Amino acid sequence: MDIFNAIIQVLDSTIRLSVPLLLACLAGLYSERAGIFDIGLEGKMLVGAFAGAAAASVFHSAFIGLGMAILISVAFAMVHGFASITHRGNQIVSGVAINFVAAGSTIILGQAWFQQGGRTPALQPGERFEAIIWPGADAARQVPIIGPIYAELISGHSILVYFAFAMVPFTWWVLYRTRFGLRLRAVGENPAAVDTAGISVAWLRYRALMCTGILTGVAGAYLSMVQNGGFVKDMTAGKGYIALAALIFAKWKPVNAMFACLLFGFLDAASIRLQGTPLPIVGKVSVQFMQALPYILTVILLAGFIGKAIPPRAGGVPYVKER
Amino acid sequence: MAQATIEPAAIELIGINKSFGAVRANRDINLEIARGTIHGIVGENGAGKSTLMSILYGFYQADSGEIRVGGKPASIKTPNDAIALGIGMVHQHFMLVDNFTVLENIILGAESDALLKRSIAKARSELDRLEREYGLEVEPDAIIEELPVGLQQRVEILKALYRGAEILILDEPTGVLTPAEADHLFRILRQLKDQGKTVVLITHKLREIMAITDTVSVMRQGTMVATRETAKTTVEELAELMVGRRVLLRVEKGEAEAGGVKLAVKNLTVRDSRGVTMVDDISFDIRAGEIVGIAGVAGNGQSELLEAISGIRHAVSGSVMLDGKPIDLTGKADPGELRDRGLAHVPEDRHHVGLVLAFEENENSILGYHDDPRYLKGPFLNVDAIMADARDKIEKYDIRPGNPRLKTANFSGGNQQKIVLAREIEQDPGVLIVGQPTRGVDVGAIEFIHKRLIAMRDQGKAVLVVSVELDEIRSLSDRILVMFAGRIVGERGPEATEGELGLLMAGVEQEAAA
Amino acid sequence: MSTPYAKLPAWADYGLIPLINLSVAFIVAGFVVLLVGENPFRAAVILVEGAFGKGTGIAFTLFYATTFIFTGLSVAVAAHCGLFNIGTEGQAYIAGLGIAIVCLSFDSTLPWWLTFPLAIVASALVGALWALIPAYLQAKRGSHIVITTIMFNFIAASIMVYLLVGPLKPAGSQAPQTRNFLAGAELPKLNWIIELFGAKIRSAPLNICFLLALAMAFLVWLLIWRTRLGYEMRTYGHSPKAARYAGISETRIIITAMMISGALAGMMALNPVMGDQHNVAIDFVSGAGFVGIAVALMGRLHPVGIVLAAILFGMLYQGGAELAFEMPAISRDMIVIIQGLVILFAGALEHMFRPYIQALFASFSPRSVGMEAVKGKGA
C-alpha cells in the first residue's frame, strides 16, 4: 500500500508539473503550426506569471490576475509577430530578444513596484486559484485503489489544471475541425497556397500568435498563482524550452503533446521523489540525469533515431510574395 | 439595340503596362477573349505571358491599362477580387498543401462554414457533381503528396471550378505532365468549353496550341505581336512570330577545326527533387575546337544537364569522359574534382551559384579556385596575388567599375557575367560549359562575351553553350542540339533556320516522327 | 531577392542604421526606467560614471568585456557560416570542466604560465567537442541546430550540476563548487595597466584573459577574412549553392565552423574561472553566452565591432552594478532588458528603419541612393 501511495503521489505531482509544460507546448503548437518558430515561450510565460501575480495581488482577484497575465503575454506575442511577420525578421533572434526583455523587466518592475527583491507579495486566499474538491472526494478516499485515484489525481486541482487538459481536445478540434484550424495548418505548410486562395497570410499568423499568447499567459498564471503563491524571479526556469522540446517530441500534434508533457512532467516528479533513493536494478539514478532526459530524448528524436520529427514546412521562413 | 445580340468578351485587356524596375514585362497589351472559347497565349520564356495573367488574377497590379470582365470594367486588386469575378487560375507551381487531402485543399479559403464538417460535406457533393459534369475523377480523401502530378493538377482545376470560375487560366499546364496525362487534360478543357467556360492556356508548346485552342495570341518581349484564329494559322507562322526576325548579332568566326573528343557525356539521366525525370538518357560528344549549342525552351532539362555535368547535381545514371578518362556523375560527383580535371563551368544562375553577391569582386574572382596554390600562402589567402590577379582580369575583360574591392552586387549584370567568365576562362580549362551566357547582359557585353567564347574555341577548347536565346545559339554554335522534354530531339548545323529549330524546340518534329 | 532593399552609402549601412537601432533600444530602455519612477538621464550618467569614472570601474568593465568578446566571437564565427549557435552558453559552461581538470591536476605543481596554456587547450577542446554533436546532426541528419544547441545547453547544465554537487565537490563542503585553485592556476591581473594612467584600483578581476580575448579577436579576423577556411565559411554562409558550386563540402564546413565557435565559447570560461573566482562554481557563465548573441549582432559580426560592443556591454554590467547601488529601484537586471532590446532592434527588427532612411536620403539627393554613390566612392 505504501508503494501504491507513493505512485499516486508521484502521478499527482506529475500532473501538477505537466500543466505549465502542456499549456506552453500547446501555445507553441499554434504558432509553429502557422509557420512561426517561437523560442520565446519561456519569456511569454514569465511575463504572464509576473503580470498575473502582480495584478491579482493589487486588485485582490485571481481572475483579474489571469486576465492581466493573458493580456501582457499576448502583447509580447504581438511584438514577436511585428518583428517576424510584418518586418520579416529572424524568428529565432526575435524569440531570444523576447526572453531577455521578459527576464529583465519582470525583475526590475517587480522590485520597483513591490520592493521584495523581485518577488510579488504572497497571494492571499481569493487572489489565487484554489483547488476544486470534487463531490465525494473525501469520502471516496477510503475506497481502495479507485478512491485515492479519484481523490488525489482527478479531484483537488485548480481550475487551470482542468483548463489545460481541456485545451488538448479543444486544440485538436480547432486544428482539425474548424476553418481557422485548416487555414492555420495550411499557412504553416504552404503560405503561397493560402495567399492565392485569397486569405491574408499575415493576419492569419497574427491570430495564431494571439492563441500562443493566451496560452502562455495562462501557463504563467498557473506558475505564479497556483503552483506558487506569488511571482519569484526566473520562476519559469527553462520550462518554455522543455515545452519546445515536448512540442518537437510530439511532432507538433496536440494529443501527442499531452503525452510528451506528461512524460517530461513525470521525469521531473520522479527525479524529485527519487532523490537519493536507489532503484532496483539500475541503482541510484542521478536527479540531473532525470532532468536532462527530456532534452536528451528530444535530441535523439531530432537526429532521426526514433521516428522522424518533420516540422511544418514553412516554419521559420518569412513569407515573401513570389515575383 | 442591335448590339445586344453581340455577347461581350469574357475578358478584355486594354493598354496594359507593367514594369519591374527597369524591365518592362508588359507593354501596351491589348487582348480580347471571347466567351466559351479556348484561347492560347504563346511566347518564349520571359515574353511576359505569366506577368500578364498574374495581373488578371490580382497577384500584381498593372501600372496602367484597363481590365474588363464580361464587358464591365473590373478592378482586380487581390486574388479575391479575381475569384469573385469568376476568374480561376491553375499555377505552374501548384498552390496546394501537400499533406492535406484533396477536399481540404479544395475548400481552403472557400469554406462555407466555420466548421469543417459542413464545409466538407458541401464540397463533397459539389465535387461529385463537378466530377460527373467534367470527367474530373479524383479521390476526395487522398493526400495530395501521394497523388501523381496529373491528378494534383486536376485538384487545382477543381479548386477553381469549386469557386465558381467561369474563366480558367492555366499557366504552362503540361510542363509536368506525361503525353497521356496531357491528352487527358485537353479532353477536360474541351469539356469545360462545351459547358460554356472560357479557358486561357499559356504555353510555349505549339503542338498544344494547334491541338486545342480556338484562337491564339503570340507574345514577344513584353508585347502582343499577333492574334490568329488557330484554324487559319500554321505552326510555322506561329514559330516565326514567337521567335521573331531579330537582327542577328553575327559574330566574326572562321571555320571550326574540330579535333578529338574532349568531353563525352554518356547515358545521363537526372531526376529533380520530386522524382520527375528531367534529363532522359542523354549522350553526346564535344570535340576540341568546336562550340556545341543546346537550344530549347527553358524547363526542358537543360539546367539539370549542366548541373549534372558540372557535378553540382547528382545524376541517377551516367558519366562523362573528360580527355578520355571517365568520371562517374552519380553519387560522389564533386564540382571540385571536375574543375581540377579541366572542366570550367559558367552557371546559369550567377546571382546564387556563380557568384556570392555579398563578396568583393576579388573574392569572387577565385570562387571555386580558392584552393589553387597560386592564391594561397599556406592556410592563408595570398591577398596580394588575389588582388593582382583580379586587377589583371578586370583589365583583360574590361570589367567596370575597375575596383576589385567593390561589392559584387554593385556591378551591372554584364559586368557580373564578365567576372564569372574571366574567372573560368583564365584558368585555361580544356572544356568550358556555359549556361545562358548573356542572360540579363547589356548589348555591349554580349558581343564581348561571344568573342571570348569563340576565342576559346579557336584555342582548341571544347565549349558547350546552353541558351534559350535562339539567335545566340545560332550565331555561336558549330553544331546545335535541340532539347525537348529531357531528350535531345535533333541535331542541326549552324545554317538551320529559326523555323526549323523552333519546331524542334516545340516538340513538333518529335511528335511527327513518333 | 538577396538584397530586397536599395543601396545606401556604406557609412549609412554600417554606421547610421546600427546607431539608430541602438538608440531606439536605449530609448525604450529609458521608458522602462521612467516606468520604475527614476530619471533615465540621471541613470545614464550614473551608469557611465560607474563604468569609466574610476580605475576600478574601468577594470571591471574590461573584465566583463573580456567574457563578452569570447562569446560574441563564438556567435559571430558560426554566423559567418550561416549557423545560429545559440549553444555558446552551454559550450562555455561545460568547458569549465576541462579547466577544472587541468587546474585541479596541476595547480600545486606547475606555475600559472604552464597551467594557463594547458587550460586554454582544455577549454577550447571541450567547448569544441560540445559543439561537434549538434554540428554533426545538422550536417548529416538535418537536425535544426538552433534546437539542438538549446537542448545541449540544458544537458551541459545538468552534467555540470551533477559534477559540482558530486564528484568535483570537496568532501565536507556545502557549496556546489570545486575546491579553490592554488596559485598555480591563478592568472595574473592586468590592473597595473590602468594604474599606469594614474588611476587607483582597489581589487578588480581584470586579468590576462583580456589580452587573450583581444588576440582571439585578431585571430578571428584573420580566420574569417584572410584564410581559405574563412573564405569557405563565408561562401557557405552567404550561399550554400555557391559553396556547392565551388566544391566546398557542406559537412566539413559546418562541423569546422561550429567547432571553432565552440572552442571560442569554451575559452570564455577561463576569464571568470581562472581569472576571478579561482574555482568552478554552479552557473558561473550566468548568461554570458546569450549576451554574446547581442554583442555579435551589434558588432555586425566583425571582430572590431564585437570588441566595441563587448566593452559597451561590459560598461552596462559594471555601470549597472553602480546604478543598482545609487537607484535601489533599478537592479542589474536592467542590463538584461537592454540586452533583449538590442537583440530585438539590432537583430530581428534590423531593417525596420531602413525604408525611412532611404526615403530621407532620396529626398536629399536622389543620386546618393543606389549605384551612383557606390561608383563615385569606388573611383
Image (tube, rainbow, N blue to C red):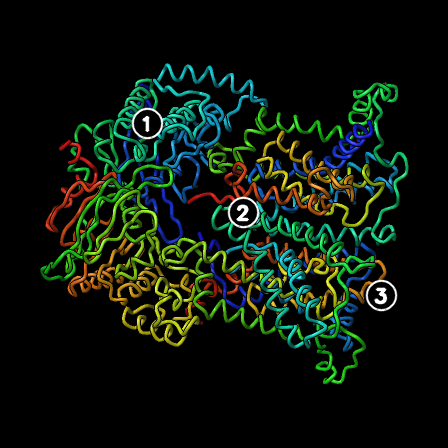
Q: Secondary structure at mark 3?
A: helix
Q: CA distance from mark 3 to mark 1?
A: 77 Å
Determine the image quadrant of residue C128.
bottom right
Tell me residue C256's x, y (percent): 49, 60
Residue where numbered disc 2 is placed: C144
Q: Are marks 3 and 1 in contact (CB under 8 Å)?
A: no
Determine the image quadrant of residue C20.
bottom right
Relative to B189, B54 lies left or right: right
Which of label 3 and label 1 is nearer to you? 3
Q: Is residue B487 above or below residue B470?
A: above
Residue where numbered disc 3 is placed: C326
Q: Determine crowd level at label 3: few under 14, some 14-19, many 20+ residues with C-alpha closer than 10 A.
A: some
Q: Is residue C165 above or below residue A65?
A: below
Measuring 34% from the left and 53% from the top, which residue is drawn there? B349
Determine the image quadrant of residue B168.
top left
Residue where numbered disc 1 is placed: B199
Measuring 84% from the left and 30% from the top, which residue is drawn there? A131
